Image (cartoon, rainbow, N blue to C red):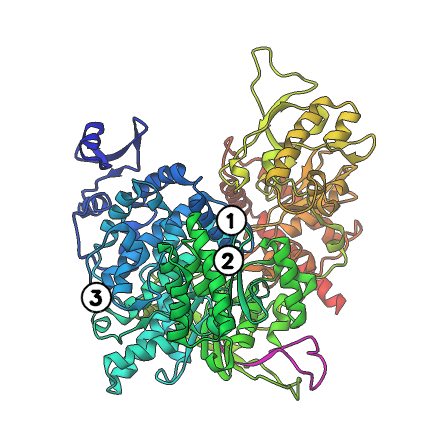
Amino acid sequence: MAQRESETGEHYVGIAADGAVFIPYQLRNGALRQLSSFTTSAENPRDLLLWLSSAVSVSADLEPTPETVQRELGQSSLAWHIAREELAALWGEVNNRPDVHLKRELWAQLMERVYGTTVAQDELFLQHTYLTTIAKTMATHVLGVNIPEPADLLAGRPFQQAGINGAVESDFFDWLLASSRGNDLVRRIALQAGRFRLRDVKTDVLKGLYESLLLPQQRHELGEYYTPDWLAQRICARTIERPLEQRVLDPACGSGTFLFHAVRLLLAAAEDSGISTREAVEMVQQQVIGIDIHPVSVQIARVTYLLAIGEERLRQRPPNLAIPVYLGDSLQWNTRLFLAEREVVIEVPDGGELLEFPFEVAGNPVIFDAVIRRMLELSREGANPEGLKAWLLRTHHMDAVTVDKLIDTYETLRQLNRNGRNHIWGFVARDLVRPVWLSQQAQRADVVVGNPPWLPYRFMTVETQQRFREECQRRGLWMGQVAQQQDLSAYFFVKCVELYLKATGTIAMVMPYAAMTRRQFAGFRTGIYGERRSRRGGHVLASVRFTEAWAFSEEVYPLFSVPSCVLFAENERGIIQNEELTRLPTTVQAASGVLPKRDATPTEASQYLTWQEIPWPAERRGRVTTGYARRFRQGAIIIPRALFVVNSAESSMLGQNPEAPLVESRRTNLEKPPWKDVPSLRRNVEAEFLRPLYLGESLAPFRLLESVLAVIPWDGEVRQLLDSSEAQRRGYAYLSGWLAEAERLWAQHGRGRRSLVEQLDYYGQLAAQFPIPPLRVVYSKAGTLPAATLLTNQQKIIDHTLYWAPVDSEDEGKYLIGILNSETARARAADLQARGQWGARHFDKVMLSLPIPQFDAANDLHQELARAAAQAQDVAELVPLREGMHFVRARRLIRDALRYDGVAQRIDELVSTLLNENASSST
């Protein structure tokens, strides 16, 4: 390989094979690096050719289904493994260049707005570069031209030459051309992406590719889930009743699934009406529009838009076609930063220069595009501003004040170009004002459709949380008691009504199922959104009447990670005269059935799903805070675990120092960035500060499993948590050294304004455990089946994945764990639980909301339940569990043993009697 690469100047993949196993390698720094191997199968011999296609173009004209695209280019493909290695090498070579650094910074800023939290992962940036290159290649193929040189491909030169704007342009991800080896990589990615037959596409084929490149944990953290084609098509068919007349907007268009089906609806209607192809395509660009804040999603959506039009229709396009898919913030949270005195003002990072555009220019997309394009062309040539001034006056007849401001901006762009910092501004500026333009009355949509972001409040940055809370309070959406359960979807829905929907328009969005039933969406379900919502006749910011709903419970899968629904509403802009009118339909259409795959075809969805009309689901009743619910509290937030949870470290043949053992950070594959990348701590710590820690995985029904070891800086003498300075002052040198290093890492990587000790004792959940009671009931916070037991050890600390409460006697403890482990209690509290893809999940205090009476030693039923729980403890302890067994399997074996013994059924009967009797007496 080394000889071949030196002879040709190209990079190669070498494959070693014995005919059964194929092992690919790349040469890196003089050494072979193995990639993922492939083992042939006699049952599926063609799989070998498909795998080889990822490395060499042995098959072309592939059918562009989501599954095929994902298989050929996704996470498990050899193409991605090769590209990832190359991209990482290129990034290491050029990431210190000012122009490359600028693009990375602008990308990171956008990602923070997308996800509500800081995203600083180079891996994600490289994934986005790969995806964008694939999308631009496919877009070029749709145009029906040969793939040009890499720089022209990434800049969209073929589209500019063909008079098509807004399809492909220079962006953050052409940084790899800064390396001499970047051209070669672009060519190879383009070769793999260009093998698909794109003439007969019927769906959004690229969304599955994006999802496949993100690990499941990444998708959960980033919310990267797209709407299946069958559902988007069904929603569009329901809402776009007059395709030739209605303007359609998807304000969170993602990969463009809704846009694809809206375009196809309009084109089909035009064909049926005898409208020419040229006129139909002209109508499409005016009437079907998308916005997204995610730069990769926007590029993919633009390709999807082109695919919806189709290669044949593009040949008959109007002279100047613009793809109306824009990179922008639909919530317009950034407008207060960029719009001042009717001007668009962009601040350049790392320099503070301002690019100013009068709004009479920026507010007209055609003029703005032309002005930006001419400025960038002239700045690259270093041209004198007189030529721009003459062009502005002659072509657009602008007044002198406007022209002077634009000339000042041009001078700034020209200087940025001299400094290597000009490349990206056309991309940024052109899309920035599109949401503002679309919110003008004359531009508003008849139909708003889409799948809004479901970003949970607890995952937002502190600044985003504050803005979100203020915005929701203004609209009556803020539900303070359940703030941690709120997400962005309801606010996004309402804001889109305010900004983009005509007074007579219709909106339909995919929402969490909780929007129909949960307290955190109670304000949303009123349909009236404003600060004075409770006053009759008060002027509100927006109001709607919900007209229809489709419900997808956990029984419908695979779909989304949680149960979902689709809510349809009509705009009722203006003054509300009667707030007592119901704004919810009395019934909903509920789906049931199991789909063959998540991105099923419309035919498959119709075949596998059945629909029935059911009453609108009742609002979930609130949880009680009296009785045992008041006594239980959540354990301590021992996070980040890499700084506190430890293993005993090997020291020497002489063994450990008993007074200050050597310990090191306990690392697991569940760690998240940035903590999974920080170095492990390895130090001696005084033995009195090393305590057993019980996690959620440490519990099974009626039995304790393995605990972990943790550094807990609690000083029992002064009854307080120590930081490094206080530990040093009190003479704990080893603990002080550990905490000093942990505090340094927390200051470098932690979020928020809390110190490390404040983080460790968040809400006082650690300090509340001292002095440790002799008897505690503990149960698991998460999961789909309960696990609770009685803890008698006075050294062990309870983690936040568990709830705990002190009890007065062993009988009371057994009584409680009998209830908390029972299927009866779980089933009766299920309607209070969060809903996941596999049903009700997470317990928190939901079972404590049941009518559980205080334990009474004189009550025969209570004593009988305690005795049954004691029997269950004996059965659970006798179940053989091998060391290191996963806790899920251990819990399953214990539950099986409890059922086999019959004690589980006996406990369920007793708990049923107990709850029925207490409910009756309460009534």
How much space separates mark 2 and mark 3, taking CA atoms?
33 Å
On the picture, is 620 further left or further right than 321?
right
On the picture, is 29 further left or further right than 546?
left
Contact flag, marks 1 and 2 (Cβ < 8 Å): yes
The x, y position of residue 610, in whole percent, is 39, 72
Name which of mark 2 and mark 3 comes first in the sequence. 2
Residue 433 visible in the shown view = no
Residue designated by label 1: 119
Residue designated by label 2: 114
Asked whether 373 or 65 is in front, the reply is 373
Give the magenta range.
527-550
The disc at residue 307 is: none
Amino acid type, label 3: Arg
**Looking at the image, residue 153 lies above or below residue 676:** below
Assess whether residue 461 is covered by the magenta stretch.
no
Residue designated by label 3: 199
Q: Secondary structure at mark 3?
A: loop
The x, y position of residue 464, in whole percent, is 61, 58
Amino acid type, label 1: Val
Q: Quadrant of residue 39?
A: top left
